[in-house]
Image (cartoon, rainbow, N blue to C red):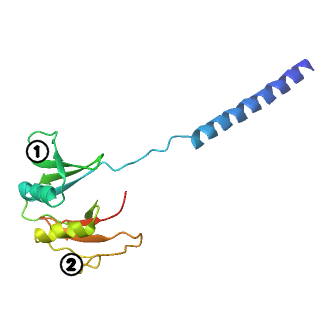
C-alpha cells in the first residue's frame, strides 16, 4: 500500500514537473526577443566619383565623412544622425540603373529646393514624370518631386516631417 501511494505521488509529481517545464518553455518562446532590423546605409555605383561627390554636396547639401577603407575610390556621406550614403566608383562604360529604384531625401521646403534645382539647371518631375511638375498631395499629404543624379539614379525630394 505504501509503495502504491509513493508511486502515485511520484507520478503526480512528474506530471507537475512536466507541465511546469512546458509552461516555462512556452513562456520563454512568447517572450523571446524579436530581432530588430534598422536601416544603416546604402551604397551606389557611380561612373565619375568626383562629379557625383560634387553633385551630392552642392545639390543635396550632404556632408562627407571619412571613408575607413584606404585606397577605395569612394565617398561616404552622413545623412541625419545615423544613416550614410556610400558612392563607389565603377569604371564601366555603362551602369545598369534600374528604372525607378530611387533615393529619397526630406527637406523643409520643396519650393526652396526647386529654386536650387532651377539655379543648377537640373530638371525635375512629378510622380507621373511630368517635367517641372510637383506632386502636391501624395496619399499621406506629402509634397514631392523627382530628378536624376549624374549617373541617372532617380532622387525623390519631399517635405515629409520627421
Question: Which residue is painted at 35% across and 63% down in the image?
Answer: 160
**Which residue of the protein is positioned furthest toward the right in this rendering?**
1
Whole-percent x and y of residue 121? 10, 72
Cα–Cα gap, marks 2 and 1:
37 Å
Whole-percent x and y of residue 116? 16, 66
114 versus 34 height, above or below = below
22 versus 158 height, above or below = above
Asked whether 1 or 59 is in front, the reply is 59
Whole-percent x and y of residue 39? 34, 50
Q: Is residue 52 left or right of residue 28?
A: left
The mark that comes first in sequence, 2 or 1, is 1
Asked whether 69 or 137 is in front, the reply is 137
Mark 1 residue element: loop
- Picture quadrant of residue 147: bottom left
**Can you identify the residue that label 2 sits on?**
132
Q: Residues within 10 Å of mark 2 (few under 14, many from 20)?
A: some
64 versus 159 height, above or below = above
**Can you identify the residue that label 1 sits on?**
72
Question: Which residue is painted at 24% across and 81% down in the image?
Answer: 130
Can residue 33 be seen from the camera position used here? yes
Whole-percent x and y of residue 144? 30, 70
**Which residue of the protein is positioned furthest toward the top in this rendering?**
2
55 versus 84 height, above or below = below
Asked whether 129 or 44 is in front, the reply is 129
Q: Residues within 10 Å of mark 1 (few under 14, many from 20)?
A: few
Mark 2 residue element: loop
Asked whether 103 or 91 is in front, the reply is 103
Q: Is residue 10 left or right of residue 111?
A: right
Amino acid at each position: 500500500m505504501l509503495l502504491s501511494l509513493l508511486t502515485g505521488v511520484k507520478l503526480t509529481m512528474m506530471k507537475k514537473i512536466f507541465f511546469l517545464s512546458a509552461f516555462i518553455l512556452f513562456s520563454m518562446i512568447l517572450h523571446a526577443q524579436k530581432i530588430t532590423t534598422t536601416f544603416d546605409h546604402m551604397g551606389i555605383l557611380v561612373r565619375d566619383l568626383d562629379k557625383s561627390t560634387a553633385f551630392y554636396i552642392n545639390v543635396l547639401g550632404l556632408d562627407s565623412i571619412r571613408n575607413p577603407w584606404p585606397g577605395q575610390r569612394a565617398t561616404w556621406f552622413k545623412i541625419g544622425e545615423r544613416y550614410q550614403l556610400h558612392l563607389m566608383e565603377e569604371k564601366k562604360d555603362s551602369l545598369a540603373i534600374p528604372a525607378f529604384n530611387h533615393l529619397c531625401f526630406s527637406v523643409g521646403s520643396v519650393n526652396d529646393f526647386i529654386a536650387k534645382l532651377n539655379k543648377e539647371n537640373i530638371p525635375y518631375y512629378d510622380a507621373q514624370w511630368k517635367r517641372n511638375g510637383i506632386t502636391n498631395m501624395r496619399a499621406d499629404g506629402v509634397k514631392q518631386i523627382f530628378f536624376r543624379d549624374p549617373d541617372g539614379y532617380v532622387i525623390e525630394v519631399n517635405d515629409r516631417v520627421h
